[in-house]
Image (tube, helix red, strand yellow):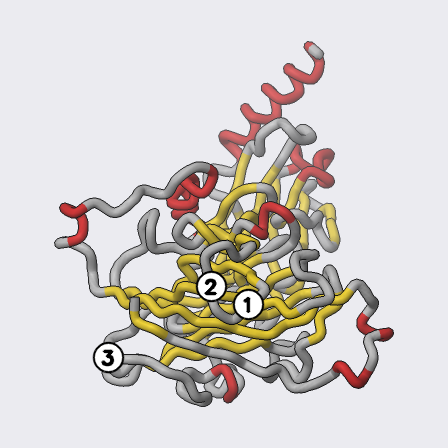
Amino acid sequence: MVAHFCLGFVVLALLATAVADPDIKVVCAKDSVRVTWRVAPQFVPFAARFFLGSCMPSSWKVLPTGEGLAHFNYKFYDCKFTKQLKGKRIIYQNELSFRPQAKPKPVAFKYPIQCVQKRPDGRIPQFLNPGSGVSEGRSKLVFHMALLNEQLTAVSKTNVIPLGSFLPIWAAVEQKSHQPLVLLMDECVAASTPELEPGNQLYPIVGNHGCLLESKRGSSLFLPRYHSSAIILYLQSFEFGMGGEVYIHCNLIVWDGDFDKRRKACHVKDGRWELLDDPARSSLCNCCENSCSPRTKRATSWEPHSVHFNSVLGPIIIVDQPASLINSSLDQSLEQHIKAKAT
């Protein structure tokens, strides 16, 4: 134990002088990144303790000077890169780290890595372009809600879903003359009827003002946005109503203000709550474990403009069979019941 303590102390002391001005070069490509990290000779014995996110160096070279050269060459879907879509930009983020001792010991040094790309024209499939479908709305707002196929390339041709597979539920609002708005799912529940009535058995999916409750029970999550006015709930199918008709009822909100505890999209990622649109502000999701600040009369007068709409998607039929064994006769076009009402 004393030896480990001394090792850590010596490494940290060396690190304080050796990485004050780190020699790090980053080259961003279309779907990958190349990072070169040149380190002092005293760190060469610790070659296995350098990381890009969760990845070790792709290659390691000892130079004639005794220095070490760590090369990281990885795709953006490797190493736990995070992806954010902001306006016309796509931002990939990660960090280099030096961890002289194994977890749970903290990192001794970290360095942010960021690659910013311009979102290419035509990247958004036509069916995902708000305004490409038909729905109802008011105040020049048109709402859409649909079940997508597994590839997220078109509206699903079937409403029969194997238990445990995913339902990509897409919602969007056509903004027309409005300033850019953010679409949020304030609350979503599953029910066995297209109309919610007293006494209905409900299965909560999203609650507490935008907290994806299903992400705590399984692998459901919100997918990264392609536009602020649309959101995709990647919902893992559940046993509720299995074999019968299931309808997804969602209270959608369009919002032109900043995110807060009542206006957010939160899901559990890597064991903790994360804010979809800005992970750095994930503290807004802490209330998902209890109650997210109810609105007060005083706050109402300061609240930016928002509009609520109730939408219904279904029927969806969840079956306890592999996709390959589902009878083709059940592979029918999804009948979409989208009923939007101003609340």
Label 3 amino acid?
A: Ser
Helix, strand or loop under label 2 = loop
Q: Which residue is mark 2?
A: 196
Q: In the figure, residue 65 lies in which quadrant?
A: top right
- Whether residue 73 is visible here, answered yes or no, is no
Please state which of the two labelled residues, at mark 2 or mark 3, is closer to the viewer.
Answer: 2
Disc 3 crowd rating (10 Å Cα; few below 14, some 14-19, many 20+) is few
172 left or right of 73?
left
Q: Which residue is mark 1?
A: 193
Q: Which numbered tag is attached to residue 97?
A: none
Horizontal and vertical percent position of residue 308: 32, 66
Point out the residue furthest to the top here: 2
Helix, strand or loop under label 1 = loop
Q: Which residue is mark 3?
A: 139
Label 2 close to label 3 by CB (< 8 Å): no
* Above or below: residue 219 compared with residue 223: above
Disc 2 crowd rating (10 Å Cα; few below 14, some 14-19, many 20+) is some
Label 1 – label 3 distance at C-alpha:
28 Å
Label 2 close to label 1 by CB (< 8 Å): yes
- Mark 2 or mark 3, which has the lower sequence index? 3
Q: Residue at x 64, y 15 (%)?
A: 6
- Mark 1 or mark 3, which has the lower sequence index? 3
- For the C terminus, give its image quadrant: bottom left
* Above or below: residue 178 compared with residue 251: below
Q: Residue at x 29, y 73 (%)?
A: 180
Helix, strand or loop under label 3 = loop
Please state which of the two labelled residues, at mark 1 or mark 3, is closer to the viewer.
Answer: 1
Label 2 – label 1 distance at C-alpha:
7 Å
Q: Residue at x 66, y 84 (%)?
A: 157
